[in-house]
Image (cartoon, rainbow, N blue to C red):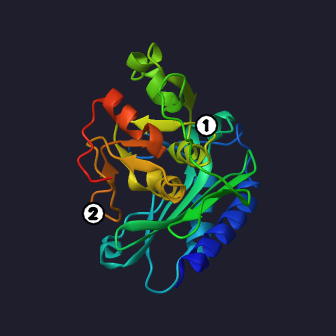
Amino acid sequence: MSTDTDLAKIEKALHIARETAKRFTSGRIETERKAGGDPVTAADIALDKVLRETLVQAGDGWLSEETLDDPVRLQKQRVWIVDPLDGTREFVEGIDEWCISVALAVDGEVVAGGICNPATDEIFLGSRQTPTTLNGKKVSVSQRTDLQGATVLASRSEVKRGEWVRFMDGPLSVIPMGSVAYKLARVAAGLEDATFTLVPKNEWDIAAGIALVEATGGKVVDKEGRTFTFNNRTTLVSGMIACGTNMFDNLISLLEINARENL
C-alpha cells in the first residue's frame, strides 16, 4: 500500500473520530482511573474503538494506549500506533489542549501520521513522502537558530512539579501545554519553535508527532540523543526533544545531551 493511501486512511479515520468526539463534552465528563492512576473516560474508549475499526485491515498490528497490548504486533510489518485521546486531563478539565493521534510504523519506522484537535478544529497530516499540512495548507518547522526568545512547549504537569525551574530564567520562552502529541504537531507546523520532555513517554504519545516533525524537516531524538524506532516490546522511551534543524545543536547543548546518531 502506498504512503499516500495510508495518509488518506489516517485522514478519514481522524474525521470519523472527530465526529465521535462531538458526542462528549470536554470539561463535563465522568472520569475513572486506570491501574496506574491515569484518567480515562468513555470518550477514550469510544475513540479507540472507532479508530481500530477504521484503520486496521488484515495483516496490520495495533498498539494503542486504550487496548490491552497484544504481542502479536511484534511480528507485524505494519503497525498502527494510536493514542485515541492524548491529553485526557486537559479534556476532563475543559482545556483545549487534547487531541487524537494516529501513526503508522512500517518495519519500526513511522512513515505517516495525523493529529486532530477537535476543540480547535485542527488536523495535522504528514508522511515521509508528503510534507506536513495543517487543515490542508503546507506548513514547516521553525527556521530559528538562536535560543534567545525561542518558544518551547512544556508539559503542563511537569511545570507544576517543578521540573522546568532550571529553564525558566534562561533564554527560552516556556509555554506550558497539555497533550504531548499536540505539542509535537504545533512544532511541526512552526507555531512554536521546540518541545521537549526529559521524562519517560510511551510510543503512542509521540509516534504521530514525530512523523509530522520529520515530514517538515525537523529533528526528534530521545533523552540520550538517539533517533527513534517503534513497535518495540517495551513501549516506554526515555524522553523526547523536537525542533527545527537550525536550532537543534544549540538546544541539544543547552540540555547537555550527546546526540550520538549521525543526524
Residue 198 seen in the figure: no
Identify which amino acid the numbered label 2 is placed on: Arg
In percent of width and height, residue 230 lies at 35, 62
Label 2 crowd (10 A; few <14 / some 14-19 / many >=20): few
Of residues 53 and 116, the one nearer the viewer is 116
Residue plotted at (33% across, 76% down): 72
- Of the numbered discs in the image, which one, if any, rests on residue 233? 2
Relative depth, front residue between 184 and 24: 184
Up/down of 160 relative to 89, above or below: above
Q: Relative to residue 248, is residue 43 drawn left or right?
A: right
Q: Earlier in the sequence, mark 2 or mark 1?
A: 1
Please say whether residue 69 is visible from this viewpoint: yes
- Foreground pick, 140 / 16: 140
- Residue drawn at the location 34% of the way across and 65% of the way down: 231
Residue 99 located left or right of residue 172: right
Type of amino acid at the residue the image marks with label 1: Glu
Alpha carbon distance from label 2 to label 1: 29 Å
Residue bearing mark 1: 90
The picture quadrant where one finds residue 87 is top right
Give how far across and how far down residue 110 sits, in percent.
43, 65
- Residue 151: x %, y % from top left: 56, 29
The reply, left or right, for residue 120 in relation to residue 8 is right
Q: Quadrant of residue 197?
A: top left
